[in-house]
Image (cartoon, coloured by chain):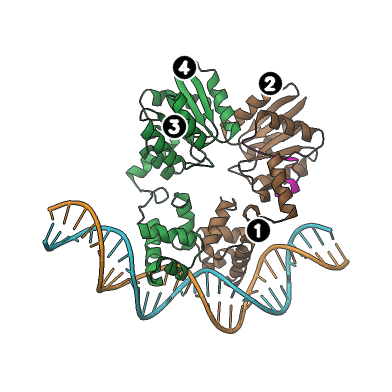
Chain colours: A brown, B green, C orange, D cyan
Amino acid sequence: MIKVAICDDHTMVLRGIETMLEDSDMIIITATYNLGKQLLAEIDNNLPNVLLLDINLPDSNGIELCRELIKKHPQLLIIGLSNYSETGFIKNMLRNGAKGYLLKNTDRQELILAITTVHKGGTYLPRNIQDILLNESIGNPSQITFIPKLTRRETEVLHLVSKEHTNQEIAELLFISTKTVESHRNNLIQKLGVRNTAGLIRVALEKGLLG
Amino acid sequence: MIKVAICDDHTMVLRGIETMLEDSDMIIITATYNLGKQLLAEIDNNLPNVLLLDINLPDSNGIELCRELIKKHPQLLIIGLSNYSETGFIKNMLRNGAKGYLLKNTDRQELILAITTVHKGGTYLPRNIQDILLNESIGNPSQITFIPKLTRRETEVLHLVSKEHTNQEIAELLFISTKTVESHRNNLIQKLGVRNTAGLIRVALEKGLLG
DNA sequence: TTAAAAGTCAGGGTAAACCCTAGTATGGGG
DNA sequence: CCCCATACTAGGGTTTACCCTGACTTTTAA
């Protein structure tokens, strides 16, 4: 039997996955979690083979959560769950130790295939995501789906900009020079491939870089 | 028996709702749809009493879809489904004929209560959303959820700003002076209660003023 | 341990955004 | 029909953002 745990803040999704798996005779659901913190606190007590992990939990960054979990439990097989097919997310997840990635429109067959595949030591990605990643690696690194990695400072500055602070205010809040803030801001504009603050905020929201 | 149809692009949510409702002896699921267009094309053949409608379908604007459906089928009882508790969305839905609104973390009990309530002719909103709306209507028209009415020009300028155009570019596109563009932009900043472009874009996206 | 990346700051300039005020259309109600 | 509210228009003046370059220190990962 493959022991599976699920972490998702939407009850409906939780119930949907439970239903899809309950008839399987190879898979047993050992735990469900609503929040990242709950997961971190309780998973040690009842470690599953496979964890289905929502990337967009309200209280945690799924990608960092994934890395933490793998660090503590290297044998844990994590499959990311998300609404979005942003390849940046997916690559980040895989880079941080996830063994698979599923969209929430996955059907029963694919869900079970994903779980059994990673349990056998493989990696599972849906066909269409494989295609997208393949296309990217060959030809165009499709700007639309690329999610840049921001540094700690850049993330801080981005959040403060989105809260309508001026560079000067941000400088005071972070105890750095306004020139430094400008640097971070320029880097953000470069990394997100935009022209100005309007694009910065729009793209940051689109890519899920802000809450 | 209450005939219920569901429209959601996430199979997992679809299955979750089905599961939650399958044991009920008052409710029967008569159809499920993945896309707004599919819903529009097929719902006439098999009209339900209650429709659970995802607001964030990939191919349609849930709010407009709601209005269209009500126009064609005034007796149809629509309950909006969404991940977000932005009261702006919710008010818009209700204004366009929806009879209820649920978040996707709803449990079985509340889901059934919502369906039976609207079927009896009532309106159903989760307790916490009721509280938010109530607070708003009493005291502070909580800037966060107040959706201002924009003029034609303001809407045009807002969209162009979000596309990273400068005032000068916008002026050329609209055949007006840059100073006029600045005025519209100032009015937008006033109306949305923000300080600068960052807030303008963020709030405009939050309130659904941009596509 | 060593190279790369991130964080820090500066100068000097241009462009854009922001603020306040105010005249000119324009369309719906008295 | 005229009036008034609202939208649209626009000016001058000030602040902030944006751009390019370069340099130094600290942190991180190979």
Disc 1 designates what residue?
A152
The kind of residue on which mark 3 rests is Ile
Taking the image as drawn, is residue B125 in sight? no
* Frontmost residue, A98 versus C6: A98
Report the disc number at residue B37.
none
Q: Disc 2 and disc 1: Cα gap in Å?
A: 45 Å
Residue, x 49% and y 42% (percent of image)?
B60
Q: Position of residue B184 (x, y in %)?
A: 38, 64
Chain designation of label 1: A
Question: Which residues, given as a range, are shown in magenta?
Answer: A91-106
Disc 2 designates what residue?
A23
- Side of A188 relative to B150 (left or right): right
- Residue A157 painted magenta: no
Q: Viewer-nearest of labels 3 and 1?
A: 3
Disc 4 designates what residue?
B26
Q: Viewer-nearest of labels 2 and 1?
A: 2
Q: Position of residue A100 (x, y in %)?
A: 73, 40
Label whose residue precedes the other's in the sequence (2 or 1) = 2
Q: Disc 4 and disc 3: Cα gap in Å?
A: 17 Å
> Do badges 4 and 2 share one subunit?
no
- As helix, strand or loop, the secondary structure at mark 4 comes to loop
